[in-house]
Amino acid sequence: MRILQLGRLSNDVNEALASGYDTTFLWQQTQADEYLRQNGNRFDLVVTSAQFGLTQTQLEYLPNLKAVCSFGVGYDAINVADLQKRGIVLSNTPDVLTDCVADLAWGLILDVARRISAADRYVRSLSWGGKQRFGNSTRVSGKRLGILGLGRIGKAIAKRGEGFGMDIAYHNRQKVADVAYAYFDDLGELATWADFLVIACPGGKETQGLVDASVLKALGEHGFLINIARGSIVDEAALIEVLQAKQLAGAALDVYAHEPNIPTALLQNGTVVLTPHMGSATLETRQDMDTLLLDNVASFMQTGRLLTAVTL
Ligand code: NAP
């Protein structure tokens, strides 16, 4: 079986795929699209990532494709309906990244409320001790934590919230059976209730623009938005408007509508904390994700089955 790897992953993964299998690196082809058009029928398995995805055109050029192994848990950049139609199986790398993404969400909650990045800028500009006081920030402990998407990562964020003595509630399409947190079947009502609204649901067509102007206004002038999921879930223009109108206290974002491009209005807003889509990017978690990706490839090669298959 032949592997096509769509984009550059870690050196460990690139080397393991190159030495262990008959692997072609698409990004090394001078004319990648043309190469794929002419040679796509040779490949049985695609290795990609949440970032590189798999386009509909690429899929059309891969008539003998049997499996897709993706690095990362989100698969909104892969057209799963088309995979399903053709009986192509898909794996991702769930669970191993949950704790680190939840940790980053908490870093962002604390940063945006307690103004840690803003304080760092203040101290570095040698303003401390001068005329301009830094002022107060907002308490986190004991407040209301609303979670949009109480899945693996959402639950890990909630668990950490318990340690901060917070009231916790969530919105999913379905109520979760094994948790005692309050369930809101309406996202706007969750936003009205919450002091902090953390987004942890998948991206994709179904959640595109789910957090719109009405949800942001419901969160309100004392509320904070934290997004560690996907930029597509938030109406970015509406977010900028409510921030500029001070109808929202602040936002902390790891993901954006058009990465790596971030609107100037967000870059210039001092109540916003920005990180470069780094939720899972710790040394330990990235190694675990590499291992799980390679284990999925090995399993499919040996048994025809994936270890962490996405249920399509
Ligand atoms: P998961 O276990 O599948 O959880 C997703 C949750 O979202 C589920 O509870 C699901 O519940 C809910 N949900 C799905 N569609 C929804 C909708 N339309 N409206 C409301 N809730 C919805 O996934 P996970 O492992 O926690 O990962 C969540 C997401 O985090 C990923 O898809 C990925 O995009 C993002 N992520 C980001 C980073 C980063 O670096 N920033 C890293 C890893 C993951 P229902 O099915 O009941 O609705």
Image: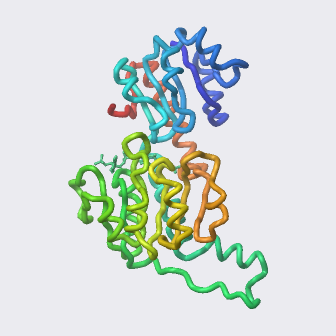
In this rendering, is residue 203 above or below 124? above
The residue that appears at 63% across and 67% down in the rendered structure is 269
The residue that appears at 67% across and 34% down in the rendered structure is 11
The residue that appears at 53% across and 71% down in the rendered structure is 245
User: Can the viewer see residue 103?
Assistant: no
- Residue 105, how many percent across, how many down? 49, 61
Pick whichever, 300 or 262, lies toward us.
Answer: 262
In this rendering, is residue 261 above or below 67? below
Pick whichever, 66 or 276, lies toward us.
Answer: 276
The residue that appears at 50% across and 68% down in the rendered structure is 109
Pick whichever, 198 or 278, lies toward us.
Answer: 198
User: Can the viewer see residue 17?
Assistant: yes
- Answer left or right for 123 relative to 5: right
Residue furthest right as drawn: 126
Quarter of the figure with residue 267: bottom right
- Residue 273, how many percent across, how many down? 59, 65
